[in-house]
Image (tube, rainbow, N blue to C red):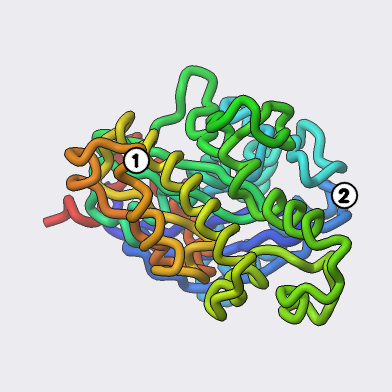
Amino acid sequence: MKKDILALGFDIGGTKIAAALGTGDGEIISSERVRSENRAPADMLEEMIVVGNKMLKANGFKSSDLSAIGIGAPGPMDIPKGTISPCNMKKWVDVPVKDYLSGKMGVKAYFDNDANAGVLAEWFFGAGKGCRHLIYLTMSTGIGGGIIVNGHLVQGASFTAGEIGHMVLDPKGPVCNCGLRGCYEAFCGGKAVSQRMQREIADQPDHPITKYVDGKIENLGYPALIEAVKDKNGYALDLWDEICMRNAQAIGILGNTFNPEMIVLGTIANHAKELLVNPINKHLPQFCWKEMINAMKIQPTALGNEIGEYSGICVALNGLFEEGKWKLPWDRK
């Protein structure tokens, strides 16, 4: 087993790609951001190679020093083939990300969806460090999830486990972007909440909540809602309580199903913290057995906005872990 693990990670997103060079001890040696919006895949893949080699050279390494490359990306994707066709990146159709990066850099690449990459990052180096049963929820434009059970990532029969945002909470609820009705994401995802606020305030240009967006109703969303809740705005408080109740409903299902030690909440919780966690805990007994609640902690992300720097690296580390080439940080002597 190598004592020194060096990994190159990429977190692919619709507007940017986070590239990072790091170690098996969780040290981020270097990181870069690459714009991805409206760019052709071939250009982006080539720039990823350039940026990766630039970080290696700047820190006195070469590609042969790498132990692995890790890639986290949005879906849809074919994990065994290592290809992606992200919904939010229209030019990317069946792009062979894994094989391209592996071939160009001369080292094995590992590949997974961004929510799984997130749970690995929080598990290895974040809020869930040391847990054997952990769930991470991405809570941004949409809602995704990553699940650790008995110290291993759950991927499922078709490598699509963890689509937590598309648990149906109410079959008569709002239509989700996925086509189902009443999904968790349709109630609590950032895009859905923005659309709801903009629809409900559309004919009220003087509504008090518009002051948080300089009167631009089209900019209403979670940032404005959180500030309005802090200011005890009545509309915001009612909407926030409903959102927290729906979050508790989904988390209760997860608690009763998986009995985790911890559920880590992503982006929105990083900004709202106890403003979100406390009311979720208040509503949780409606949806979850007390035995599960007593065993489970709900925790905002510890990595915050830096999770993108860790996620690709942690996909690489998990690949090495599953092959017996890297030990979990808390299992080392």
Comparing 165 with 290, the one in front is 290
Instruction: Identify which residue, 169 or 301, lies in the foreground.
Output: 169
Q: Quadrant of the C terminus?
A: bottom left
Q: Residue at x 67, y 72 (%)?
A: 224
Which mark is in front, 2 or 1?
1
For this view, does 122 lie left or right of residue 158? Answer: left
Where residue 136 sits: x, y (%)? 42, 48
Residue 228 image offset from top left, x and y in percent: 61, 75
Q: Residue at x 68, y 41 (%)?
A: 97
Please give the residue where the numbered disc 1 appears in the rendered image.
286
Indicate the secondary structure of the residue bearing disc 1: helix
Q: Secondary structure at mark 2?
A: loop
Decide if residue 140 is in sight here: yes
Say which residue appears at 63% left-offset and 62% top-offset. Answer: 18
Give the quarter of the image for residue 81. Answer: top right
Quadrant in the picture for residue 285: top left
Residue 323 or 142: which is nearer the viewer? 142
Classed neighbour count for the residue bearing mark 1: other residues with Cα under 10 Å, few (<14), some (14–19), many (≥20):
few
Q: Which mark is residue 40?
A: 2
Q: Is residue 174 above or below residue 131?
A: above
Give the amino acid type for the residue marked by disc 1 in the picture. Answer: Gln
**Numbered label attached to residue 129:** none
Looking at marks 2 and 1 on the same chain, the residue that comes earlier in the sequence is marked by 2
Residue 46 seen by the camera: no
Report the amino acid beneath label 2.
Ala
Pinpoint residue 202: horizontal percent, then vertical percent. Answer: 86, 61
In the rendering, at what x and y percent does residue 193 appear?
68, 54
**Across the whole image, how many numbered discs are drawn on residues?**
2
Q: CA distance from mark 2 to mark 1?
A: 48 Å
Residue at x 57%, y 26% (from the top left corner):
80
Pick the front one: 293 or 297? 293
